[in-house]
Image (cartoon, rainbow, N blue to C red):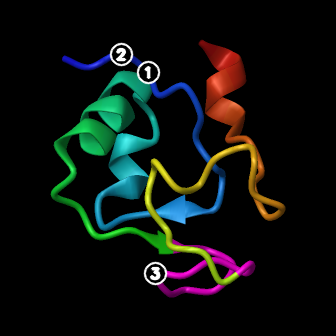
Amino acid sequence: MSAQPAHWCRRLRWKTYSVDQEDPARVGQVFAEGATLFTCLATTHPVGPDDGAVAPECCAPDRSCYQPHPRLACV
């Protein structure tokens, strides 16, 4: 099983998000697999409000639209 992600935007979504979000290690696994299509909750598209690509490696603290996911603070 993968470790929790180093960063995780609260707007990042994928098909199994509602189940996966409960387990940060599972989220880390989803991010590492790279086989999931991601969308942004703010735009409902694979592009964020800043017109950047939506993916775990792209949705990072250096983006203006990034908001840390509250689950990261819990672990």
Left or right of residue 51: residue 14: left
Identify the residue under disc 3: 46
Crowding near pointer 2: few (<14 within 10 Å), some, many (20+)? few
Please provide percent x and percent y for residue 25.
35, 22
Crowding near pointer 3: few (<14 within 10 Å), some, many (20+)? some
Question: Which callout, 3 or 1, points at the residue further toward the start of the chain?
Answer: 1
Left or right of residue 21: residue 41: right
Region in magenta: 40-50
Query: In the rendered view of the protein, which quadrant contains the C terminus?
Result: top right
Identify the residue under disc 2: 3
Query: Which label sits in the foreground, 3 or 1?
Result: 3
Please provide percent x and percent y for residue 68.
73, 41
Q: What residue type is labelled 1?
A: Gln
Left or right of residue 73: residue 13: left
CB under 8 Å between discs 2 and 1: yes
Label 3, label 1: how many angstroms apart (C-alpha)? 23 Å
Q: What residue is rendered at 66% in x and 52% in y?
A: 10
Based on the displayed image, in which of its 4 quarters is residue 17 positioned?
bottom left
Please provide percent x and percent y for residue 51.
66, 84
Main secondary structure type of the part rendered in magenta? loop
Identify the residue under disc 1: 4
Based on the displayed image, in which of its 4 quarters is residue 22 positioned?
top left
CB under 8 Å between discs 2 and 3: no
